[in-house]
Amino acid sequence: MQLKTRLISALAAILITVFLATSIINYVVTRNAVRDDLLRSALPLTGKNIYSEIHSALMRPLLVSSAMANDTFLRDWVTGGEQNEDAVRRYLSRIKKEYGFLSTFFVSAVTDRYYTPDGILKKIGPRDPHDVWFYAFTRYKEPYDLDIDVNQAAGNTMTVFVNFRLEDDRGRLLGVTGAGIALDKALELLDEAQRTYLRQAFLIDQDGLIQIHPDTSLVEKAYITEMDGLRDIAPDILAGQGDAVSLQYDAGGRHYLLTSRYIPEFKWHLLVVQDEMTALRTARGNFMRTLAMGFVSTLVILALCVLAVNKYQARIEHLARTDPLTGAANRRELEERFDLAAYRASRDGIPFSILIIDLDGFKEVNDRLGHLAGDEVLASMARVIRGRLRPTDLLARWGGDEFIILLDGNEESARALARRISAAVCAAPDIPVGFSSGVAAYRDSDDLTSLTRRADNAMYQAKARGGDCVMAAEDL
């Protein structure tokens, strides 16, 4: 039993180890393949698509704003003293309507007036937080920039402004002109990436400040240099101004894959981020299904193995306890049954006896008909004897042409059994011989050797009387 348990345990351990190892290896290979595909293909392609859409959406206001900054009408109107307010209003209104912008504007560096298609919005001032952009932009001498801010001329809508410097022929600043598009349009592009690809996309400037993000609370407020995980790769992101850069980072117990693409016209970086756990959802599902199938397969295989082992163990045990020729018990089984019967006799007083049967003239059968015929006689003899036994009786082959029967009851019960067997043997056409038998009842001091010796002596006395009879040890 212990050997069988160890065998089944070892087999279970091997199967579970193989299934786990195979599943884990497959998952790791799949994860690496998915990760490689994301970094090399999927994320860059998503970034390229979003880049194209955003580039297209922002390039038109950039080009139009550039044209406005180089328009001689606007330059002449400012240098002429900004006399006809209605003329600039119509000019801004026409551009806004023609290109479908949220707003168009001109801020004069001469009069500090903020012109819109609806007229003068206000006069700017350095203390107004909404006007900080103007002074910062003009101070750095850049020809243009992009700014995210609320549009006071459009109901405080979050707007991407394209600002261009308007200068006279000598390079003196006359003001800032440009156009604004609703941030909602850019956010729709990023939200679509989130819905379609389950990937987060956002834009940052050269300082790492978020400019466009689906979470508007981060716009113009959060720096990637201060964000968990991103801060570790921020220098690599901000340094990349050529081809797309693929990076990885960990944040909040999750692993993220990132592609950064620089947009030189806007001096922004487009970031596309993929949570690896989300990308591996299918692979994880396959992994769990593989584990479940492996577990079920292991149970089925173990069940089949247990059935097979039990079957062959039972067969082996049967062979170990049975004479292969006659099907009778062997000495090992007889010894165990004797010990059990002796225990019952000593504890409960249940008597038992043994009956030894020895075939008469069996040697002549072998000599005349051959050993195969002799084997058939022994097998037939065992079959006939078993047909006369009770379920509690045991037939064993004692050796050669001798059989021994262990049965409940005294010597008289054994004598009666011998007579029934003798009658059956005489009626059997395939048994050409008779038998002599000896009977001995168990005594408290007996072991199997002493008990069989007394029965054997009785059997020899029966043979000495000419055979074909039964003798009891108590008769001697």
Image (cartoon, rainbow, N blue to C red):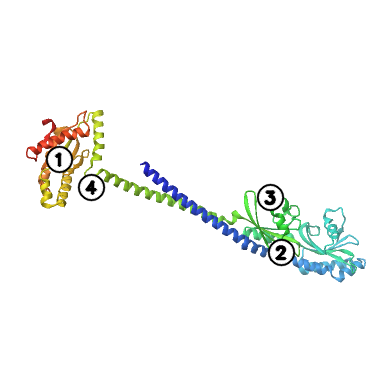
Provide residue 55's location: percent of width, then percent of height. Answer: 72, 65
Q: Is residue 163 above or below residue 464?
A: below
Q: Are marks 3 and 2 in contact (CB under 8 Å)?
A: no
Q: Is residue 3 left or right of residue 261?
A: left
CA gap, disc 4 to disc 1? 19 Å
CA gap, disc 2 to disc 4? 87 Å
CA gap, disc 3 to disc 4? 78 Å
Residue type pointed to by label 2: Gly
Q: Are marks 1 and 3 in contact (CB under 8 Å)?
A: no
Q: Are marks 1 and 2 in contact (CB under 8 Å)?
A: no
- Would you say residue 457 is visible in this rendering? yes
The residue pinned by badge 3 equals: 228
Going from N to C along the chain, the mark reached first, 1 or 3, is 3
Q: Is residue 154 above or below residue 382?
A: below
Provide residue 199's location: percent of width, then percent of height. Answer: 64, 58
CA gap, disc 1 to disc 3? 93 Å
The local secondary structure at tag 4 comes to loop
Residue type pointed to by label 1: Ile
